[in-house]
Image (spheres, rainbow, N blue to C red):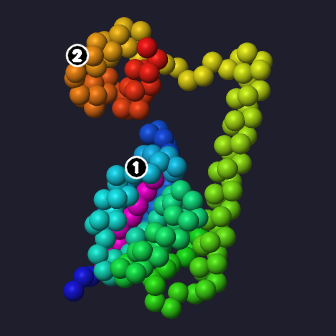
Amino acid sequence: MNAGKRVAYVRVSTVDQNTERQLEGVAVDKTFMDKASGKDIHRPQLQAALDYLREGDTLVVHSMDRLARNTEDLLRMVRELTAKHVSVEFVKERLTFSGQNDDPMATLMMTMLGGFAQFERSLIRERQREGIAIAKEKGVYKGRKASLSPEQVALLKQRAEAGEKKAAIARDLGISRETLYQYLRQS
């Protein structure tokens, strides 16, 4: 029978953010950590944690917004985990869900707090778009710095035209495949 491991999932949005504060002082047996935006669906360490969890385990997460991109994903993930007899513990909100006699008030709190977090992210994106629009009107918005030099772009295009695999080219240049395709579309 499973002894019930405490498995932590930690996520930060950028590489330079500190992960230590999230579960400081919380005892866990294993930790999975992603450095990816919450909106990013491809979070390999979250998937690895979900694959690792077994009946009787507890998934420990600093806060709800670290686990899910939106309220719908949050509720689905908690529901799916508890159906597999895996408990989910949110440290910051002091809520734990096990699927067995869960408190309806706790479920309501999870839904409301998840909704507030999603609303807050939407406001931040809206303010960011407004700020960029104003900066563009003033002519001070330069956009993001190009990932590659003109020489690297020329090399990228040569290699792609020669039939080399796009994933290999992107990996060699340290860019995503999507960025590679954006450069190819610019020609």
- The quarter of the displayed image where residue 109 is located: bottom right
Q: Which residue is denoted by mark 1 in the rendering?
A: 42
Residue drawn at the location 73% of the way across and 40% of the way down: 127
Along the viewing direction, whichever of 179 and 91 lies nearer the viewer: 179
Magenta stretch contains residue 10:
yes
| Horizontal relation, residue 144 to residue 2: left or right | right
Which residue occupies the extreme bottom position in the image? 101
* Segment colored magenta: 4-12
Which sits earlier in the primary sequence, circle 1 or circle 2?
1
Magenta stretch contains residue 163:
no
> Which mark identifies residue 107?
none
On screen, residue 128 above or below 148: below
Q: In this orientation, does residue 55 appear?
A: yes
On screen, residue 64 above or below 45: below
Residue drawn at the location 31% of the way across and 27% of the way down: 170
Q: How far apart are marks 1 and 2 (CA)?
A: 30 Å
- The quarter of the displayed image where residue 132 is located: top right
Task: Identify which amino acid the numbered label 1 is placed on.
Answer: His
Task: Identify which amino acid the numbered label 2 is placed on.
Answer: Ala
Residue drawn at the location 27% of the way across and 24% of the way down: 169
Along the viewing direction, whichever of 104 and 186 lies nearer the viewer: 186
On screen, residue 41 above or below 134: below
Q: In this orientation, does residue 19 appear?
A: no
Q: In which quarter of the image is the C terminus?
A: top left
| Horizontal relation, residue 124 to residue 18: left or right | right
| Residue 104: percent from left, percent from top | 61, 86
| Residue 105: percent from left, percent from top | 64, 84
| Residue 80: percent from left, percent from top | 42, 74
Q: Which residue is denoted by mark 2 in the rendering?
A: 162
Residue drawn at the location 77% of the way across and 26% of the way down: 134
